[in-house]
Amino acid sequence: MPQMHRFFSGSINSIKTGIIQHRCYVIPRSSYAPTLGGDSTIENNLKTETNRLSKTSQKFWKQVSIKEDGSKLLMQLDSKSILTPLGNPIVIDKDRRLLAMLLQKEWETLPNKSIKPHLLPLTSLVSRCIDLESVHGENGDPDLMAKIGGDREKIATDLLRYLDTDTLLIFSPHYEYEGALREAQNNLYLPLISTVEQFLKRYTPSEVNLRVLDSDTDGLRGNSQAASTREAAKKFLDSLSLWDLAVFENTVLTSKSFICGILMLQSKASLKPSRHLELNTEEIVRAATLEIIHQVERWGEVEDTHDVDKRDVRRKLHAAGIVAFRERG
């Protein structure tokens, strides 16, 4: 049996949601999808090379390489396969060659010491994709599925909650920022909402009308989507491959937006993207952080809060875009 390095990425065991009001300017870092390390029930007590990395935070390999194996690309450290938290080799399809090259660069550019979890966003998300596919495979283990929060129905149920409190469905009052924020939301969000409604109509014979929360007229009430809208959104989730579902999950948890998840997959993963749903990743980041952008413009940036949050959101959404991307013929 060849020696292998085991890489530990965080997994989503549960998704916490709540009513997001327009005054919640800063997204807590603790609510983001984790990027590295630490399910003690799976691997913490195992003596592996990856635990060595987790404990010492020091680089112990000399070379990162990509080995071609038919239609697959194998990621290796010193000619030894890198493993996911569940022990699956990190193997990339050839139509995602760019992803393999960036994974290689991610490992090559790590510092020799003080390696932090956020420095491996691509490896973390790719591991999530591969392990989800593994636990849903022919020999999938229900216990492992539970440990990594991999039950597809549970993931879908949790993600659907974000449709009620979607960042792009909450509009600030006109009196804030002299109306500048509300004008920006109207200009950016309303066309996207209309296009996403048309997109979701593919999945239901019923009408799809996304309900928004208008702070001028609705106050602090909660928001809830119609059953027909939730049904269409659920069918959309059911249509996704497990790889794309993991990317969607990461995007939604980071942006607090179901709509941003749709935009990400349509822009990066779809071979035939819907018209008007193709945005570059920076545009998706802007949509997810529009209120924070206006807050910073008005009040200035709070050190170690806004700057850290902004980098965290950009890093994770760009990682999601890279992992989702596949070459179009």
Image (cartoon, rainbow, N blue to C red):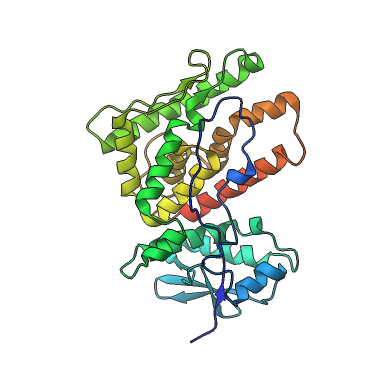
Left of 319 or right of it: where is 276?
left
Residue 236 occupies which quadrant of the picture? top left
Q: Measuring 49% from the left and 37% from the top, which residue is drawn there?
A: 257
- Which residue is at the front of the view, 322 or 254? 254
Q: Is residue 95 visible?
A: no
Q: Is residue 107 visible?
A: yes
Q: How many marks?
A: 0
Q: Could you say where residue 216 lies in the image, as x and y percent from the top left?
A: 52, 13
Q: Is residue 58 left or right of residue 156?
A: right
Q: Nearer the viewer, residue 186 or 39?
A: 39
Q: Residue at x 49, y 42 (%)?
A: 252
Q: In the image, residue 200 lies at what x, y percent?
A: 33, 35
Q: Camera-side residue: 12 or 249?
A: 12
Q: Can you name the residue that lies furthest to the left here?
A: 205
Quadrant including the C terminus: bottom left
Quick one: which residue is furthest to the bottom in this view? 1
Name the spot of residue 228 as percent of width and height, x first: 28, 31
Residue at the (54%, 83%) spot, across then down: 3
**Picture residue at 58% right of the left edge, 44% below the top:** 31
Q: Position of residue 283 (x, y in %)?
A: 55, 37
Question: Toward the viewer: 297 or 96?
Answer: 297
Q: Is residue 217 above or below residue 295?
A: above
